[in-house]
C-alpha cells in the first residue's frame, strides 16, 4: 500500500500517525530487558538439570526461547501500535467471539492440551505449535469488547416498556436502576468466566473479572452494582473456599505455611521466602542466587521474583516495583488523556490487568494472598503470554499516538 | 442480540430521550484517578512492606534455615596408615570398600502415581503397583546378593519408613564395579546405591593380633591401632561449600577446601617370621600339655628392648575381631552362658522368658570371651614369675659380692624360715644336698636362694627389685600395661618370710613384659631397657618422621656381674633344669619357672631363655597357664609329662630359640662335645685294608666294626658320602660278607642315650640324637624316634631319636 501524502490523510489518519508515548515505551522496554536478564539467571540451572526434551540440559533453553518470543512480541507491539485503534471497535466483538470459541476448544479432547488434569492450553495451530492460554486472549477480548460498548453508553438511550403489564413496569424499574444495561455485559462475562473457571483456571478467572470490572467502573456504572456484585463474589469465594477441600487446604497452607499440614505443599512458598530473605538489602549479586539451584521449584516461572530479590536485594526489588509503578501510572495517565472514551477504557482495562497480575504474583510469593498461580509480566517464562502482554502494550501505545499534543500557550 | 432478547421479553420497549450514561466527564476522570492511585501506588505498599519484612526484618532468622539447607559440609576421610613388620611386610592396611544402601521409602517414590496420560491413579491401583514393584525389588536384591535372608529382604523392602538399610557392607572393588554398572543400567540410584567406606585388612589374619589390635567404628580400639591411633588415622579434610537441592557440590567463591592429611605408616620391631614361630610354639604347647588357661610369649632383642614377637593365646582374627575362634574359648563361653543363665534365672525380677534370659546370658558370655581373646596377656596380666626370678636375685647377689661361684649350698629338701610356721619346701623333696652355686641355680634350689636372699637383706633386695624395673611399668608403646597396685609389698612392710619367698619368685606379681626386661638386664651387660614395638613412623612415601632409639632406663648391674650371671644361667640349660631347651650348636642360657597361681592344680609353667649366651641376640619368655593334671593333685598330665617349666616351657622354648637364631642367621658354633656328634660324611673305605679304613674313619670321628673275614674292606654301610652323626659306628664288610638289605628297627623309647645308640647300631642303623645336651644323665631318655620300633628300614638308615629329660624344678 503506497503511503499517502500527509495532506491526503483524513484527520483520523493523521492522528493515528502521531508519536507514540515514549515514556511508556521506555518503561516497557526496561522491564522487558530486566525481565529477560533475570529469567536467564533464574532458569539457567533448572534448564541445565532438565534432561527431558525439548530442554535437554541446554542451559540457554529458556532464555533463547523467551528472547525469541520477546523479539516477536516487540515486533507485534510495534505493528499493533501502528494500527489506528479505532479499528479495534469493530474487531472487539470478533475477537471476543474467537476467544470464546478457543475457550470452548479447550474442552474438546483431541485439541485440548491437558497438563496435570488441567486444560488451560491450546496449540497455536491447534494441532501443532507452541501452547498458549486462550484465557490470555479472552482477557484482552473482554476488555476491548467492554470498552467498545461502554464508550457509547453516554449516547445510548434508555428503554421504556409498557406500563400496562407488571412485567413492563418491572422492566422499567430495572432499566431505571441500570440493571438492564448490565445484562449483556453480565451475560458475556459469565459465559467467559464459566469457560475459564472450569478449565479450571482460578487466577485467569480473577484477572478477567477484575479487568472487566475496571472497565465497567471507569465507564460510569453506578457503584452500588460493584458493592453488590463484590459482596456476591466474596460470598461465593468464601463458600467455595470452605466447601472444596482443595481450596480449604490451600487456604490453610497460606495461613500457616510453616505448619505440619503445609510440609510438602508449602515447600515452594517456603523456599521462595528463603530466597527473598537471603537477598537482604543489597542481594547476593546478579547470578549469585543459591536458591535457584533446585531449592525453589521452577524458579523461571511464578517464583521468579523471589530469585530477583535474592540476587538484587530489596533495593533491586524496589527499583523494579518502581518501574512497574511508573508503567502503571503512565498507563492511567495515558487513559485519562486518551482521545476518546474507547481508548480510555481500553487502557484502563489493560493496565488494570497488568497491575493486578503484578500484585497477585508478588502478593503470592510474599504470602500476602493465597497461592493463585499468576505469572509476573515481562519476567516469568512463557513465550505466548509474553507476546500477548506485549501486544496489549502495543494497543496502549496505539492509543497513545492519538493523544492530542498539549497546547503550547 | 440485545434487542432481540428484549423484544422477546416485551415488544413495547422503545428508546427514550434519556441516555444511559451521564456524560459526566468528572466522574470518569475521578474513577480513573482512583484506579490509578490504587493500582499505581497504594497497591505497592503492602508488597513493599512485606518484602521489607521478609528481607530485612526476618533476614537473619530465615538466613539460618537457608544456610542449613544450602551448605554442604562434609569431611574427607584420611587414609589410615599401614602397619609393617620390621621387614616391610604389611600387617595392617586400609582399602576403600563400599556399602550397599537401600531406601525403601525412595523405592515407593520411584513408582509414578500417574498413568501414561498423566492422570492420577486411584489409590488401590497405585498401591498394587507399588506392591508389585516391591516384589520385583526383592527378587532383584536376591539375585544380586544370593546370600541374603529372603525374609529380611522382604521386610526391609516393605519398610517404607526407612531411608537407609545397609544391604551389604564392605563390597570390594571388583564387585563394586559390577554393581555400579547394574545401578546405572537399571537407574536405581535413588533407592539402591553404594557408599564408600574404608576397611582395615590384616593380611596375616591372626598373627600378632593382640599387639596390632583392631579398628572399629570409633578408630583404633585395641593394641597398636589404639595407641598410635592419632598417628595412623591422619587428619580428616573438610569441604564447606554451597550445594544444589539435589545435594551436589557447587564450586564457587564461598567454597572452602581443607585437604585430608593421610595417616603415617608404622614400622614395627615385630618380625612376622619370629612372631609366627612364637605363636606356633604356644599352640603346640597348648595341644601337647593340655593347657587350659591360655599361654603367652615374648621374644625381644635383649640389648635394645625391641620386641620381635609378642603373642597371647587365645587369639583372634582382627579381620573379624568379634568372632570367637578359639575352641577352648568357645567351650568356655558355653559353660559361662549356662552359669550366667542360672544366675539370671535366680534373680529374674523382670519376668523374662527362658529364651530371653538365655539370650542375655549368651551375650554376656560372648562379651567375656571377646574381651579374653582381645587381651594381650603378656602385657596386661600379672603373674608370679617363680623360679625365673632367681636369675635376678643371683645377679643382685653377685653385684653386691655376697655370693661367688665357689660358694656351696646345702639343701635338705626344706628350710625353716623364722616367722613362718611350716618349713618351706624345695621342689626336690629329698633335697639337693651339697651343691655349688651353679648347681644350685641349675637345680633351681629354693633353700639355696632363700639363703642368697637373706644375704641380700630386705633393703638391698628391695633396691634391686626396683632397679630391675619390677616396681614400675615398662613404658612399652602398647596399651593396657597392667597396674602394679598391690602386686608387691611396701618396702617397710616386707618381712623375712616375704623376702624368703620372693627370693624364688613367689608371692609377688609382675607383668611378663617387666619380667623379660628385668631378665634381659641380667644377661645383656646390666642395662634395663625400655621395650618398644614401633621402630619408626613414616609418611606414605617413605620419609621417616620418627625413629625409635633404644632407650636404656638404667644400668642395674655391672658388665662383669652380668657376664658371671650369664655363665651360670647357660649351665642351667646345658646341665640343669633347663636342659630340655638345649639345642646343640647354640649356646642357650635361661631359667625355668613353675609359678603357683593360688588356685589348686593351676600351675603356670614358664621358661626364660636367651641365646647365644656370649652375645645375646634374642631373649624369649614363654609360659603356659594351667597344663591340666591327669587327676586332681597330680603332678603329671594325662600324657605323663611332669608339670613344670623345665619339662614343658623349656622343651618348647629350645627349638623356638634355635629357629629364631637360625632365621636371624646366627651360625651354630659347636663345642668339643657337640662337634663329636655333628654329622660327618662317610669316607670311601672299600678296597682298603681294615687298618687303613679304621684310621680314615677315625679322622672323621667315626668308629667301625667288621663283619666277615678278610683283610680288605669289600663293602661298607653306610655308603660313602652319606651323612651320619659323628661317633657312629660304620660297618665294614670283609671278604665275601654281604650286608643285609634291611632290618627291623628296634624300639628305643625309654632307653638312655647310650643304650639307644647301641641298640640301633647293633641292628645296623645310626642314631641322630636331639633334644638334649651332651651331658646325658640317667634321667635323659628317648621319647620318640623317626622310624617306629618294629618297622622295617634299610640298613644304614639314620634314625632321629628325640631325647627328653625329666627335671625337677
Image (cartoon, rainbow, N blue to C red):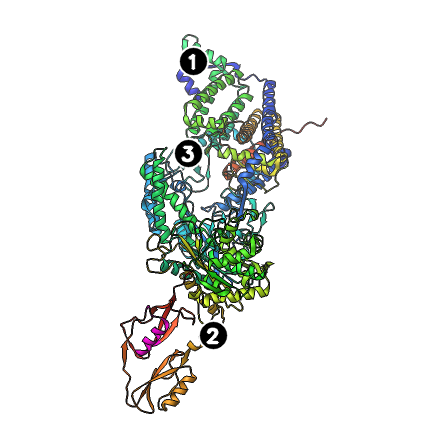
Q: Dot 1 falls on which chain?
A: B
Nearest to the eye among marks 2 and 3: give it: 2
Q: Measured along the vertical axis of the image, is residue B235 above or below residue B406?
A: above
**Label of residue B12 in the image:** 1
Q: Position of residue B153 (x, y in %)?
A: 34, 45
Magenta part of the protein: which range? B749-766
Q: Secondary structure at mark 2?
A: loop
Task: Return the residue nearer the eye: B76 or A123.
Answer: B76
Task: Return the residue nearer the eye: B333 or A63.
Answer: B333
User: Magenta stretch containing residue B760, yes or no?
Assistant: yes
Q: Secondary structure at mark 1?
A: loop
Nearest to the eye among marks 2 and 1: give it: 2
Q: According to the image, label 3 marks what residue?
A: A118
Q: CA distance from mark 2 to mark 3?
A: 104 Å
Q: According to the image, label 2 marks what residue?
A: B670
Residue A217 appearing in the image: yes
Q: Dot 3 falls on which chain?
A: A
Q: Measured along the vertical axis of the image, is residue B331 above or below residue A241?
A: below
Same subunit under labels 1 and 3?
Answer: no
Nearest to the eye among marks 1 and 3: give it: 3
Task: Return the residue nearer the eye: B196 or B484.
Answer: B484
Q: CA distance from mark 1 to mark 3?
A: 47 Å
Q: Measured along the vertical axis of the image, is residue B99 above or below residue B265?
A: above
Q: Dot 2 falls on which chain?
A: B
Same subunit under labels 2 and 1?
Answer: yes
Q: Position of residue B456 (x, y in %)?
A: 56, 56
Amino acid at each position: 500500500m503506497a503511503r499517502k501524502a500527509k495532506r491526503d490523510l483524513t484527520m483520523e489518519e493523521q492522528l493515528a500517525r502521531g508519536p507514540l508515548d515514549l515514556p511508556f515505551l521506555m518503561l516497557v522496554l526496561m522491564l522487558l530487558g530486566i525481565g529477560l536478564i533475570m529469567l536467564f539467571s533464574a532458569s539457567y540451572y533448572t534448564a541445565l538439570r532438565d534432561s527431558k526434551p525439548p530442554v535437554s540440559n541446554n542451559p540457554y533453553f529458556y532464555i533463547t526461547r523467551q528472547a525469541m518470543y520477546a523479539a516477536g512480541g516487540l515486533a507485534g507491539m510495534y505493528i499493533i501500535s501502528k494500527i489506528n485503534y479505532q479499528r479495534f471497535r469493530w474487531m472487539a466483538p470478533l475477537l471476543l467471539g474467537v476467544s470464546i470459541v478457543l475457550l470452548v476448544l479447550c474442552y474438546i479432547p483431541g485439541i485440548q492440551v491437558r497438563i496435570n488434569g488441567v486444560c488451560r492450553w491450546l496449540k497455536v495451530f491447534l494441532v501443532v505449535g507452541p501452547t498458549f492460554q486462550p484465557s490470555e486472549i479472552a482477557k484482552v477480548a473482554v476488555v476491548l469488547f467492554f470498552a467498545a460498548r461502554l464508550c457509547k453508553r453516554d449516547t445510548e438511550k434508555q428503554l421504556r416498556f409498557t406500563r400496562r403489564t407488571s412485567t413492563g413496569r418491572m422492566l422499567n424499574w430495572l432499566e431505571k436502576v441500570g440493571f438492564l444495561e448490565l445484562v449483556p455485559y453480565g451475560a458475556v462475562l459469565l459465559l467467559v468466566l464459566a469457560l475459564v473457571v472450569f478449565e479450571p483456571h482460578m487466577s485467569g478467572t480473577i484477572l478477567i473479572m477484575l479487568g472487566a470490572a475496571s472497565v465497567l467502573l471507569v465507564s460510569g456504572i453506578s457503584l452500588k452494582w460493584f458493592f453488590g456484585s463484590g459482596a456476591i463474589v466474596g460470598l461465593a469465594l468464601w463458600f467455595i473456599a470452605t466447601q472444596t477441600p482443595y481450596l480449604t487446604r490451600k487456604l490453610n497452607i497460606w495461613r500457616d505455611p510453616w505448619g505440619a499440614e503445609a510440609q510438602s505443599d508449602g515447600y515452594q512458598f517456603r523456599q521462595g521466602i528463603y530466597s527473598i530473605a537471603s537477598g537482604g538489602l543489597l542481594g547476593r549479586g546478579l547470578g549469585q542466587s543459591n536458591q535457584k539451584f533446585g531449592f525453589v521449584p521452577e524458579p523461571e516461572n511464578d517464583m521468579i521474583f523471589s530469585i530477583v530479590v535474592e540476587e538484587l536485594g530489596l533495593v533491586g526489588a524496589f527499583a523494579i516495583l518502581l518501574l512497574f509503578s511508573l508503567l502503571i501510572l503512565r498507563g492511567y495517565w495515558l487513559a485519562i488523556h486518551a482521545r476518546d472514551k474507547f481508548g480510555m477504557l481500553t487502557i484502563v482495562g489493560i493496565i488494570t490487568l497488568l497491575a493486578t497480575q503484578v500484585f497477585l504474583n508478588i502478593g503470592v510469593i510474599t504470602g500476602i494472598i493465597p497461592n493463585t498461580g499468576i505469572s509476573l509480566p515481562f519476567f516469568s517464562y512463557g513465550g505466548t503470554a509474553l507476546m500477548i502482554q506485549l501486544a496489549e502494550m502495543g494497543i496502549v501505545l496505539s492509543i497513545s499516538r492519538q493523544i492530542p499534543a498539549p497546547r503550547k500557550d | 442480540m440485545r434487542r432481540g432478547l428484549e423484544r422477546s421479553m416485551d415488544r413495547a420497549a422503545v428508546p427514550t430521550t434519556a441516555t444511559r450514561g451521564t456524560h459526566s466527564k468528572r466522574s470518569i476522570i475521578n474513577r480513573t484517578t482512583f484506579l490509578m492511585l490504587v493500582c499505581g501506588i497504594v497497591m505497592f505498599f503492602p508488597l513493599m512492606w512485606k518484602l521489607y519484612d521478609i528481607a530485612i526484618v526476618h533476614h537473619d532468622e530465615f538466613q539460618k534455615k537457608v544456610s542449613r539447607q544450602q551448605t554442604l559440609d562434609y569431611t574427607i576421610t584420611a587414609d589410615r596408615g599401614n602397619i609393617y613388620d620390621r621387614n616391610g611386610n604389611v600387617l595392617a592396611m586400609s582399602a576403600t570398600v563400599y556399602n550397599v544402601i537401600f531406601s525403601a521409602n525412595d523405592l515407593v517414590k520411584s513408582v509414578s502415581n500417574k498413568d501414561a496420560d498423566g492422570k492420577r491413579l486411584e489409590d488401590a491401583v497405585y498401591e498394587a503397583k507399588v506392591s508389585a514393584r516391591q516384589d520385583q525389588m526383592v527378587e532383584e536384591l536376591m539375585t544380586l546378593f544370593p546370600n541374603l535372608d529372603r525374609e529380611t529382604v522382604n521386610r526391609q523392602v516393605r519398610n517404607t519408613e526407612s531411608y537407609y538399610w545397609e544391604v551389604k557392607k564392605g563390597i570390594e572393588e571388583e564387585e563394586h564395579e559390577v554393581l555400579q554398572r547394574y545401578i546405572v543400567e537399571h537407574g536405581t540410584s535413588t533407592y539402591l546405591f553404594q557408599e564408600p567406606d574404608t576397611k582395615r585388612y590384616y593380611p596375616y589374619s591372626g598373627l600378632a593380633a593382640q599387639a596390632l589390635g583392631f579398628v572399629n567404628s570409633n578408630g583404633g580400639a585395641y593394641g597398636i591401632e589404639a595407641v598410635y591411633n592419632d598417628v595412623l588415622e591422619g587428619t580428616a579434610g573438610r569441604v564447606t561449600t554451597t550445594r544444589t537441592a539435589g545435594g551436589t557440590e557447587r564450586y564457587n567463591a564461598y567454597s572452602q577446601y581443607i585437604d585430608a592429611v593421610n595417616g603415617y605408616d608404622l614400622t614395627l620391631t615385630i618380625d612376622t617370621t619370629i612372631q609366627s614361630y612364637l605363636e606356633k610354639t604356644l599352640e603346640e604347647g597348648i595341644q601337647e600339655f593340655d593347657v587350659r588357661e591360655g599361654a603367652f610369649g615374648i621374644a625381644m632383642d635383649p640389648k635394645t628392648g625391641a620386641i620381635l614377637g609378642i603373642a597371647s593365646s587365645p587369639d583372634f582374627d582382627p579381620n573379624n575381631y568379634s568372632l570367637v575362634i578359639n575352641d577352648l574359648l568357645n567351650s568356655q563361653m558355653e559353660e559361662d552362658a549356662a552359669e550366667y543363665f542360672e544366675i539370671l534365672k535366680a534373680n529374674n525380677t523382670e519376668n523374662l522368658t527362658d529364651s530371653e534370659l538365655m539370650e542375655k546370658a549368651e551375650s554376656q558370655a560372648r562379651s567375656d570371651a571377646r574381651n579374653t581373646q582381645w587381651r594381650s596377656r603378656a602385657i596386661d596380666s600379672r603373674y608370679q614369675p617363680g623360679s625365673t626370678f632367681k636369675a635376678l636375685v643371683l645377679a643382685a647377689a653377685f653385684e653386691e659380692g655376697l655370693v661367688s661361684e665357689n660358694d656351696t649350698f646345702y639343701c635338705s629338701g626344706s628350710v625353716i624360715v623364722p616367722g613362718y610356721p611350716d618349713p618351706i619346701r624345695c621342689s626336690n623333696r629329698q633335697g639337693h644336698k651339697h651343691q655349688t652355686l651353679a648347681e644350685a641355680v641349675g637345680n633351681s634350689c629354693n633353700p639355696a636362694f632363700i639363703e642368697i636372699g637373706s644375704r641380700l637383706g630386705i633393703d638391698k633386695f628391695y633396691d634391686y627389685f626396683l632397679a630391675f624395673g619390677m616396681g614400675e611399668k615398662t613404658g612399652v608403646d602398647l596399651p593396657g600395661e597392667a597396674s602394679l597396685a598391690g602386686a608387691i609389698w611396701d618396702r617397710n612392710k616386707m618381712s623375712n618370710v616375704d623376702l624368703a619367698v620372693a627370693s624364688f619368685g613367689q608371692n609377688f606379681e609382675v607383668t611378663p613384659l617387666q619380667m623379660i626386661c628385668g631378665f634381659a638386664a641380667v644377661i645383656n651387660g646390666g642395662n634395663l631397657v625400655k621395650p618398644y614395638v614401633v621402630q619408626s613412623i613414616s609418611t606414605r612415601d617413605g620419609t621417616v618422621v620418627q625413629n625409635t632409639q633404644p632407650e636404656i632406663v638404667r644400668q642395674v648391674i655391672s658388665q662383669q656381674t652380668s657376664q658371671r650371671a650369664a655363665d651360670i644361667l647357660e649351665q642351667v640349660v646345658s646341665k640343669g633344669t633347663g636342659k630340655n631347651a638345649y639345642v646343640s650348636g647354640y649356646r642357650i642360657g635361661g631359667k625355668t619357672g613353675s609359678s603357683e597361681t593360688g588356685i589348686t592344680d593351676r600351675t603356670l609353667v614358664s621358661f626364660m631363655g636367651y641365646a647365644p649366651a656370649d652375645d645375646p641376640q634374642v631373649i624369649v619368655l614363654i609360659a603356659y597357664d594351667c597344663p591340666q593334671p591327669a587327676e586332681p593333685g597330680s603332678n603329671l598330665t594325662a600324657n605323663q609329662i611332669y608339670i613344670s617349666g623345665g619339662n614343658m616351657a623349656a622343651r618348647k622354648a629350645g627349638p623356638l630359640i634355635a629357629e629364631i637364631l637360625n632365621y636371624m642367621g646366627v651360625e651354630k658354633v659347636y663345642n668339643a662335645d657337640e662337634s663329636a656328634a655333628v654329622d660327618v660324611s662317610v669316607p670311601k673305605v672299600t678296597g682298603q685294608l681294615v687298618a687303613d679304613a679304621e684310621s680314615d674313619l677315625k679322622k672323621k670321628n667315626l668308629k667301625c666294626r667288621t663283619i666277615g673275614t678278610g683283610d680288605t674292606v669289600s663293602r661298607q654301610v653306610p655308603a660313602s658320602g652319606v651323612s651320619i652323626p659323628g661317633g657312629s659306628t660304620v660297618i665294614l664288610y670283609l671278604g665275601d660278607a654281604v650286608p643285609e638289605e634291611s632290618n627291623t628297627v628296634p624300639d628305643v623309647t625309654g632307653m638312655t642315650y647310650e643304650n639307644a645308640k647301641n641298640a640301633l647300631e647293633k641292628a645296623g642303623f645310626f642314631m641322630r640324637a636331639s633334644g638334649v645336651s651332651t651331658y646325658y644323665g640317667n634321667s635323659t631318655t628317648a621319647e620318640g624316634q623317626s622310624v617306629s620300633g618294629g618297622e622295617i628300614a634299610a640298613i644304614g638308615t639314620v634314625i632321629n631319636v628325640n631325647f627328653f629329660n625329666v627335671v625337677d624344678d
